[in-house]
Image: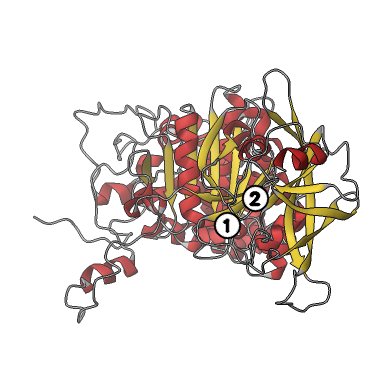
Amino acid sequence: MFAEREKSAGEATSQERRDAAQNDARILGHVVQCDGARATISAFADTGDGAVTGLWTVGKMISINLGSSRTVGLVYGIGKADGTWHSQEQNAIEVSVELIGEVRDSVAPAKPVFDRGITAYPHIGAVAHRIRNRDLQAVYDLAGRHSVTIGTLSQDETIDACIAIDDTLARHFAVVGTTGVGKSTAVSLLLRKSIEARPDLRVLILDPHNEFAAALPDNSVKVDTSTLDLPFWLFRLEEFAEVLFRGREIVPEELDVLRDLIPAAKNLYRNPGAGTFIRRGGDSLTADTPVPYRIADLIKQIDERMGLLESKDYRPTYRSLKTRIESAINDPRYRFMFASRLIEDTLHQTIGNIFRIPHGGRPITCFEMAGMPSEVVNSVCSVLARLAFDLALWSEGKLKLLVLCEEAHRYMPSDPRLGFAPTRHALSRIAKEGRKYGCYLGVVTQRPGELDPTILSQCSTVFAMRLANEQDQAIIRSAIADSSASTLSFLSSMGQREAIAFGEGVATTMRLKFERLPANLIPGKRQDLGVAAGDGGDVDLVMIVERLRNVPKPQQNLGFAEPVDAQRQAGDSGYRKPPAETAAPPSDEDLDVSFGLKPSTFGLRPKTG
């Protein structure tokens, strides 16, 4: 009987029973309707003796036998036409299937080969089977591409879920999902697999919640406001203005003054005896040129302009701008920008430490922004994204960089009136042109509906985890490029660590479950969550208040650069940088004098003891 059914079905390969409830020929049903993308299969929900088999469930994959090939389909809907259940007879059901592709048996080597396209569509009466293990492996086979295993298939946990790591990185990727579904854990797993497969890769994580450094302890370094050295002269004019105006509307007149005076201050740094004369031609400086200058020179230029007779009408503008600059340099939260050690040209050291050149076995930089002033986060992210692209561009392909944006809708909102335009432009440039030069973008967000659609469209591989919002689901449905759109109907009901992956990094749309990470390597995991809350006696309130005030104590030799002679700064005549082993760290008074300010301007008490 088995041989007769196999012969009548016409399937050239041997049968494989995947379930004990199947009959000998594995026949589940027959095709009764088919169009270019979907098919309907007529079957029975129970056996002749009334036992419910449960062979038909949403999310399962089946194969439709056509003799020389087998059409692969995904079950996305099941129902009874009459809407009733009969206990005395078999219950006929209709199964809705989305056609994904077809599998053919190759001659050499003798194994099934999957093709996304369909050359022969199922005919009426074609036999539907549960898909065999070998066919299922062929569906998700990457055809020799460099791959890594990130989990298992949801349909069959004995089969590894693999992604083509080079295509996933080079053509950008996105991880979307609502809060609490394991989004950060999935990103942490992807990063681990990426640096294992690509040892030459450097990763910069824009981490707004300070959670990835603890999850990647052996592969990352942490950069925060206490260890970051990002000189103010590295900021472009728009970025520097964002810092000075602190998120408020920029005054055009003050911006024009900065555009005129910053080049003059840069020229004074390079040519201390040249006055304010700016050379024209190939060596001219602009407000965006990354050349050091001194804030004291900039303030001096403003004072000189205010003293001119023809500037009488503009004195309020100059006075207001001077107040903004002094307010910023006096704010201890901005010491990572305005410390005196950052006036000299240490650009190569700054870039080397942020982008891990050389990486010393730790290729990941976790840029922690939780302790950074919110009004300066946009500018800093803009600078880092711009530097990442320029580094990859001018390294001529020798440097491979991945910029990972956690909570990406903060920097690239769908509404162009929101966010910071230079940050959006810098990240958009990476998304549109970065893969040509080795600069890649990773986007992580819980609200894809609020993300710039241009950015999301550039992410060729998407890992979609559970999404409850209808608008967010619609965005993902519009992004899917193949015929597996019905797979996304599971977006609102997927479990923890589950995702639907589609795009260039996978062979076809794949529902997978990520590998489980140890509890101590899960981003944001707190080991003491299970500890019962006490009366608060162990809370260090003094430390908390100090952090709220955000006034750091004086520290010696902060950051990466060498200490400098604060009495004579870079650009002064006779300036010589002292040897590192004999140089004394600058005192608080020296730090203040270096800006041309009075001692204790920063509000710090002298160090005692």
**Residue 137 occupies which quadrant of the picture?**
top right
Lateral position of residue 121 relative to residue 595, left or right: right
Q: Can you name the residue that lies furthest to the front here?
A: 1
Lateral position of residue 462 relative to residue 126, left or right: left
Q: Can you name the residue that lies furthest to the top here?
A: 108
| Callout 1 amino acid | Glu
In the picture, the quarter occupied by the C terminus is bottom left
Q: Is residue 495 visible?
A: yes
Q: Is residue 306 visible?
A: no
Q: Can you name the residue that lies furthest to the left here?
A: 609
Residue of label 2: 422
Crowding at label 2, few (<14), some or many (≥20) Cα neighbours within 10 Å? many
The answer to which of marks 1 and 2 sits earlier in the sequence is 1
**Which residue is nearer to you in this view: 128 or 471?**
128
**Residue 173 occupies which quadrant of the picture?**
top right
**Which residue is nearer to you in this view: 168 or 453?**
168
**Which residue is nearer to you in this view: 52 or 461?**
52
Residue 151 percent coordinates (x, y) = 50, 45
Residue 354 percent coordinates (x, y) = 43, 38
Does 145 appear above or below 156?
above
Labelled disc at residue 242: 1
Residue 528 percent coordinates (x, y) = 26, 65
Crowding at label 1, few (<14), some or many (≥20) Cα neighbours within 10 Å? many
Element at badge 2?
helix
Q: Nearer the viewer, mark 1 or mark 2?
A: 2
